Image (cartoon, rainbow, N blue to C red):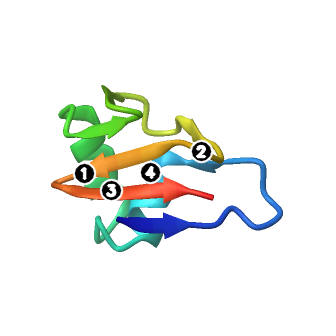
Amino acid sequence: MDEFKLESEEFIELNNLLKIMGLCDSGGMAKTVIAEGRVTVDSNVELRRRCKIRTGQIVEFEGRKIVIK
């Protein structure tokens, strides 16, 4: 399980998180995998690419989990 620290930010958008964590090579790829329903947030399929991800949430894509700290 990977961790992502928000630092001084309140949230990160889902598509940006996937890019920063190296799960998607580009914003276009992130947008596509989200639209296809392949990403979950707290075990629920998330279709909004700009969904605000906050501390304590868990994002999962292709078997990799990211905990937001």
Q: Quadrant of residue 52?
A: top right
For residue 46, above or below residue 69 = above
The residue that label 1 is drawn on is 61
* Amino acid type of the residue that numbered disc 3 sits on in the rendered structure: Lys
Mark 3 or 1: in front is: 3
> In this image, 58 relative to 26: left or right?
right
Which badge, 1 or 4, comes first in the chain's sequence?
A: 4
Mark 4 or 2: in front is: 2
The residue that label 2 is drawn on is 56
> In this image, 52 relative to 30: left or right?
right
Q: Is 64 or 30 nearer to us in this picture? A: 64
Q: Secondary structure at mark 4?
A: helix
| Labelled disc at residue 65 | 3
For residue 51, above or below residue 65 = above
The residue that label 4 is drawn on is 15
Which badge, 4 or 3, comes first in the chain's sequence?
A: 4
Q: Are marks 4 and 2 in contact (CB under 8 Å)?
A: no
Q: Quadrant of residue 5?
A: bottom right
Which badge, 1 or 2, comes first in the chain's sequence?
A: 2
Mark 1 or 4: in front is: 1
Spatial CA distance of label 3 from label 1 is: 7 Å
For residue 16, above or below residue 44 = below
Spatial CA distance of label 3 from label 2 is: 12 Å
- Work out which quarter of the rendered image holds the N terminus and state it: bottom left
Q: Position of residue 69 (x, y in %)?
A: 63, 58
> In this image, 3 relative to 61: left or right?
right
> In this image, 39 relative to 21: left or right?
left
